[in-house]
């Protein structure tokens, strides 16, 4: 893989100071930063190519249409979809999931049917299913987890039945980093005749994606968690499912013919892309995918996993060793064995680590880290049911990306060390 | 004798100036201020006295004696508790009229928005509104 400094050069945002300290950006599970190629693509599009796509006869429209459709081809290859028409542009994972719940769900779910989700879901893969289940009289079932944050697959087996119509499952947990055994989940769901939607928001930047090998029915993808612009997502769906589903929104683009009496709908993917799409951001998204392809997922993953192991070992060492040896006075939070608790210790994980510090609120930890220029996420991570299951009201979450460095992890560990020692002097 | 609201704010501004924008020291200072906040009676920490709109939990309990409003407060996060303590320092022990007529000029002077972020900023605004509402209620009940 390219040298880390060469990679960092491509991310201008990283080269700044926050609160007088060099920025350490460890909030990548919330959104990744954007490489220059993406930023420049946006600039070029609005400087030279901006026109509404499809239908117009002029050169700019032809150019922007070609670039827009080029991104569709790139994402098709990225996820190995059989056909390019199976990739629908949305505004993000949330919209992709809502689209399936409101079209597939409305057509196929009936009273007494069951939809299975997991305890690890983001609210965006809970609420859309709750809404359609309530409307249809269907029942939402939840696969439980163990304390490490892994799905209890034996419990999944028990939940599956001929009543199961949909299994909507997060591929990688945003709060804990757990990689779910989606291949097995899909096979078992198909065995009872259920369809499977994967929430790929966190997975697609770390893991290899092959929708044909997985045989998932739907996959929701986010651009902004994959080095691309915000406001763009993709819904992959198998052709026969997408064709059978009713449209999501009505408007321009999604029609074949309109009269005041009736409307016939366009072919996929356009049937699901009513209105002028987010053209510029979709076009720039291609450059983000190219960036990932050039580096290679395996290289990205190896680098991120190294950072994760270094971080986890560092945090555990703060617990084991005498962090008070720096001469800081002893206090009630000085019990070194209890100071930091890792939340989410699944065997299969991406580079995300949640933790809590005993006696300190996660907001305060986040503020203290920010004072040293370190950006992390604190709170419930839009997974309140998961936090309830773990008996927490939130965690501090560090999440890595390809541009993060070992030196940044050192800065982070030093800051955490200071928090677990000095801070306790200042609180009751 | 209770200092007046303007003097208290001026002394808060002077204290913060000592840190010369060193955010880490400011946060430690806020935690220290929180620690000095008089303990709030547990029986007052009820749903009724939670300030709505705060990201972290904040309780604010008012009482009225000898024409003065007294505030007890607490929070489940240390930095917020420090911020709450500033409002208690300024407004607890003042008359309803003085509370209602006062402007909080110290907030901009110490650059609070920078230190608490926009979400906490909204919570802080809720807290200020709540205090003024209690003051108004006491004023009209006199």
Image: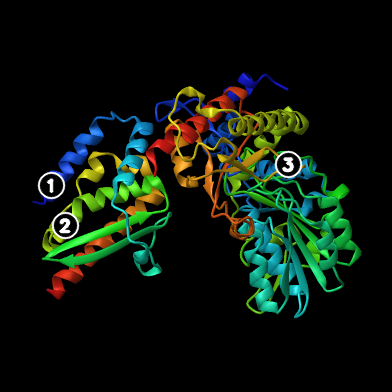
**From the viewer's perspective, is residue B7 above or below residue A155?**
above
Q: Which mark is residue A349?
A: 3
**Residue B102, can we see it?**
yes
| Labels 3 and 2 in the same subunit | no
What's the residue at 87%, 72% (across, down)? Answer: A162
Which is more toward the observer, A285 or A23? Answer: A23
In this rendering, the count of numbered labels is: 3
**From the viewer's perspective, is residue A61 above or below residue A48?**
below
Compare marks 2 and 1 and give the one earlier in the sequence. 1
Colouring scheme, one of rainbow, by chain, secondary structure, one colour: rainbow
**Residue A215, can we see it?**
no
Where residue A206 sits in the image (x, y, percent)?
Answer: 72, 38
What's the residue at 70%, 33% (across, down)? Answer: A292
- Secondary structure under badge 3? loop
Left of A180 or right of it: where is A31?
A: left
- Secondary structure under badge 1? helix
Which is more toward the observer, A333 or B8? Answer: A333
Where residue A68 sits in the image (x, y, percent)?
Answer: 67, 44
Q: CA distance from mark 3 to mark 2?
A: 55 Å
Circle 2 residue = B93
Q: CA distance from mark 2 to mark 1?
A: 14 Å
Q: Farthest right residue?
A: A191
**Label 3 Cα crowd, 10 Å radius (few <14 / some 14-19 / many 20+):** many
Where residue A363 sits in the image (x, y, percent)?
Answer: 46, 46
Subunit ID for the residue under disc 3 = A
Q: Please report contact status of discs 1 and 3: CB closer than 8 Å, yes or no.
A: no
Circle 1 residue = B6
Left of B127 or right of it: where is A282?
A: right
Which image quadrant is residue A230 in?
top right
Which image quadrant is residue B56 in?
bottom left
């Amino acid at each position: 893989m390219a040298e880390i400094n060469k990679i960092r050069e491509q991310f201008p945002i990283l080269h700044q100071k926050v609160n007088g300290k060099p920025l350490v950006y460890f909030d990548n599970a919330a959104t990744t930063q954007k490489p220059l190629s993406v930023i420049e693509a946006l600039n070029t599009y609005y400087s030279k190519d901006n026109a509404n796509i499809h239908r117009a006869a002029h050169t700019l429209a032809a150019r922007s249409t070609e670039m827009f459709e080029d991104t569709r081809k790139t994402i098709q290859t990225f996820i190995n979809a059989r056909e390019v028409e199976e990739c629908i542009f949305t505004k993000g994972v949330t919209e992709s999931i809502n689209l399936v719940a409101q079209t597939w769900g409305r057509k196929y779910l009936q009273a007494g049917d069951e939809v299975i989700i997991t305890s690890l879901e983001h609210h965006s893969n809970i609420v859309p299913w709750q809404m359609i289940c309530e409307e249809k009289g269907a029942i939402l079932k939840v696969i439980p987890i163990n304390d490490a944050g892994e799905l209890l697959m034996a419990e999944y087996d028990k939940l599956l039945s001929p009543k199961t119509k949909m299994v909507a499952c997060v591929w990688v947990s945003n709060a804990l980093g757990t990689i779910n055994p989606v291949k097995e989940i899909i096979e078992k769901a198909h065995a009872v005749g259920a369809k499977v939607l994967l929430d790929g928001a966190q997975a697609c930047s770390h893991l290899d994606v092959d929708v044909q090998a997985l045989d998932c029915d739907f996959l929701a993808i986010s651009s902004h968690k994959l080095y691309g612009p915000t406001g763009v997502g993709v819904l992959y769906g198998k052709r026969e499912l997408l064709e059978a589903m009713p449209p999501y929104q009505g408007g321009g683009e999604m029609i074949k013919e309109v009269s005041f009496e009736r409307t016939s709908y366009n072919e996929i993917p356009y049937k699901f892309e009513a209105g002028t799409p987010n053209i510029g951001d979709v076009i720039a998204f291609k450059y983000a995918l190219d960036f990932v392809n050039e580096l290679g997922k395996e290289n990205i993953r190896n680098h991120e996993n190294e950072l994760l192991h270094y971080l986890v070992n560092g945090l555990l060492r703060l617990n084991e060793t005498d962090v008070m040896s720096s001469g800081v006075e002893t206090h009630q939070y000085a019990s070194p064995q209890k100071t930091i608790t890792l939340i989410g210790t699944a065997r299969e994980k991406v580079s995300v680590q949640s933790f809590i510090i005993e006696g300190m609120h996660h907001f305060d930890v986040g503020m203290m880290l920010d004072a040293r220029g370190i950006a992390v996420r604190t709170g419930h991570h839009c997974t309140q049911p998961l936090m309830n299951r773990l008996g927490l009201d939130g965690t501090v979450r560090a999440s890595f990306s390809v541009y993060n460095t070992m030196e940044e992890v050192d800065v982070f560990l030093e800051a955490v060390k200071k928090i677990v020692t000095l801070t306790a002097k200042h609180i009751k | 004798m209770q200092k007046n609201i303007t003097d208290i704010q001026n002394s808060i501004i002077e204290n913060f100036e000592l840190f010369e924008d060193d955010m880490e020291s400011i946060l430690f200072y806020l935690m220290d201020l929180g620690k000095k906040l008089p303990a709030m009676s547990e029986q007052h920490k009820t749903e009724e006295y939670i300030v709505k709109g705060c990201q972290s939990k904040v309780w604010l309990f008012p009482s009225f004696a000898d024409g003065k409003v007294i505030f007890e407060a607490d929070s489940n996060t240390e930095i917020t508790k420090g911020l709450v303590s500033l409002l208690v320092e300024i407004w607890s022990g003042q008359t309803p009229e003085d509370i209602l007529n006062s402007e909080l000029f110290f907030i901009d002077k110490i650059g609070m928005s920078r230190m608490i972020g926009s979400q906490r900023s909204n919570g802080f605004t809720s807290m200020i509104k709540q205090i003024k509402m209690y003051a108004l209620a006491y004023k009209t009940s006199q």
